[in-house]
Amino acid sequence: MLYSKGMKYSVLLFVFLLVFSVNFPAQTKSLQVDGEKHLANIKQLTFGGENAEAYFSSDGKRLIFQSKRDEHKCDQIYTMNIDGSNVKQVSDGEGRTTCSYFFKGGKKILYASTRAGSKDCPPNPDFSKGYVWAVYPDYDIYTANADGSNLKKLTNTPGYDAEATISPNGKKIIFTSERDGDLELYSMDTNGKNVKRLTHEPGYDGGAFFSPDSKMIVYRGSHPTDPKLIERDKQYLKEHLIVPMVFEIWVMNADGTNKRKVTDLGVASFAPYFTPDGKRIIFCTNYFATDPKKRNFDLAVINIDGTGLERVTFNDSFDGFPMFSPDGKKLVFGSNRNAATPGDTNVFIADWVE
């Protein structure tokens, strides 16, 4: 869920531009970095290239993730066991894909794809306009069997539909869409019916996940108040672009009520996920970066009332896209640590230590 949360390709380009100008070693002696007291027994599951947004099945035995590998020129969707074995491509290889997730029970999956617009990969965003993300209008949300068969289109509205995740109780999907002219969050039943708009603030809302009890939603939001920035964002969205330099973490009830901002850090904070007890949020942020360009991204936890910010990872490049296993014992995340080639983003899994 590029994040995505939904826009993984754009997020990785963000990391490339902000991080890869730093010289860091191709290999490290240990996957563990000093200070990472909440992580133990870190294991690397993928090796080389772009791999990210790995999410657990409801039984905690499998992961679904997106990767640019093999003959593919842009991301496709894969599944694997949590030990990294039995990797299988489950998307059909057409278009660009992102934001994959297991349905409750693990027999079905969903992901976003541009395949209806073209079998080819869409073009990269135009960076002559500065650092921007592309929100491809051909993205729609699809469902399939866990092996990729029986592919069905779930959304069919003009513009971007992506960044979909499913509530733990298996009843609702939350996703980002520009169907009403702005990038907002919507919920729907798992069959695509009863669509309801949840956010209404100018700007971008996305990368959402449900709490363990399915009663709350955490998401990233960018809501500029400067009229010039608001107008800039409107013009860029007409070109299917957004400027992703400042995101804050928000929570709300699953019906869209009681919205409140959790962070007020003024930096790029994204990929939020609830801790197993539902009382805190783990997320990715460049808040702790010490260089002026804020190149380093780490994982952090914070209470849902915005107190108790604590740094979790201390890697010198990028850690992001965290998700807890259903039993709360494991954390999966994407990272540039131990990269064989500068820029490699791989999937890692660790024991979570309170």
Image (cartoon, grey):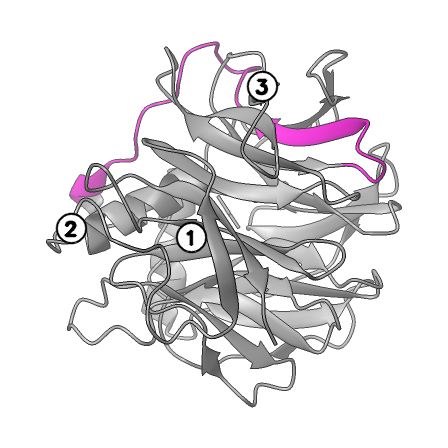
Viewer-side label of 3, 2: 2
Q: Name the residue under label 3.
A: 88
Horizontally, residue 273 falls left or right of residue 297, namely right
In the picture shown, does residue 175 fall above or below 275? above
Q: Mark 1 points at which residue?
A: 234
On whether residue 167 falls in the magenta region, the answer is no
User: Residue 130, how many percent across, how many down?
Assistant: 20, 49
Residue range (magenta): 103-128
- State the residue at coordinates (84%, 37%): 190
What amino acid is labelled 2 in the image? Pro
Label number found at residue 200 = none
> Which quarter of the rendering shows the N terminus?
top right
Q: Mark 2 points at which residue?
A: 25
What amino acid is labelled 1 in the image? Lys
Asked whether residue 263 appears in the rendered view, the answer is yes
Local crowd size for mark 3, using a 10 Å CA cut-off: few (<14), some (14–19), many (≥20): some
Precedes in sequence: disc 1 or disc 2: 2
Q: Which of 58 and 203 is in front in this view?
A: 58
In the picture shown, does residue 218 fall above or below 331? below
What amino acid is labelled 3 in the image? Lys
Viewer-side label of 1, 2: 2
Precedes in sequence: disc 3 or disc 2: 2
